[in-house]
């Protein structure tokens, strides 16, 4: 079974998925947001089609460790997903993932338009890979 990660944005949701061994994250795609109902329906379809057993939502924690309005929105979305999906939904600290994604894309010398489309997906990959690595370390210790 696989793990799905979401990088929530106001206009887009970046998606990444693990391999079946839950070791490596790869970008899936970017979903353009329309409404909460449509977003939830879309994600239900992805969970079913990709045989997802767990969803990880990026939690935007402030650099000082506090939770601001965006974090509250992520918790609200997590609650909505918990009601709609038949799999557990967790949050994972996503500090610096969007900035790191932008840095990687700039180094790849991609145009602004191409970066815009890939940034959310790459941020989701970074969220998921961080989650997978932390999980693996905690089971080894």
Image (cartoon, rainbow, N blue to C red):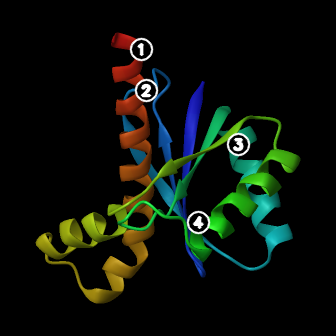
Residue 125 image point, x, y percent: 40, 51
Residue bearing mark 2:
135
In percent of the image, x 57 and y 31: which residue is there?
2
Tell me the number on the disc at residue 47: 3
Decide which of 95, 13 is in the foreground and name it: 95
Q: Earlier in the sequence, mark 2 or mark 4?
A: 4
Secondary structure state at the residue bearing disc 4: helix
Residue at the bottom extreme, as displayed: 112
Q: CA distance from mark 2 to mark 4?
A: 22 Å
Q: Are marks 1 and 4 in contact (CB under 8 Å)?
A: no
Q: CA distance from mark 2 to mark 3?
A: 21 Å
**Where residue 139 is drawn, which disc sits there?**
1
Q: Earlier in the sequence, mark 1 or mark 4?
A: 4
Q: Which residue is mark 4?
A: 71
Give the mark nearer the N terminus: 4 vs 3: 3
Marks 2 and 1 in Cβ contact (< 8 Å): yes
Q: Quadrant of residue 128?
A: top left
């Amino acid at each position: 079974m696989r793990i799905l990660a979401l990088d929530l944005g106001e206009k887009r949701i970046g998606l990444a998925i693990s391999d079946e061994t839950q070791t490596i994250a790869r970008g899936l795609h970017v979903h353009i947001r329309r409404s909460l109902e449509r977003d939830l329906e879309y994600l239900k379809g992805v969970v079913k089609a990709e045989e997802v057993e767990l969803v990880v939502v990026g939690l935007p924690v402030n650099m000082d460790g506090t939770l601001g309005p965006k974090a509250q929105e992520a918790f609200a979305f997590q609650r909505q997903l918990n009601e709609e999906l038949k799999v557990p939904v967790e949050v994972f600290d996503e500090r610096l993932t969007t900035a790191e994604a932008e840095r990687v894309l700039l180094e790849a010398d991609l145009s602004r338009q191409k970066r815009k489309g890939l940034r959310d997906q790459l941020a989701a990959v970074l969220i998921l890979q961080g989650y997978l690595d932390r999980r693996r370390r905690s089971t080894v210790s």
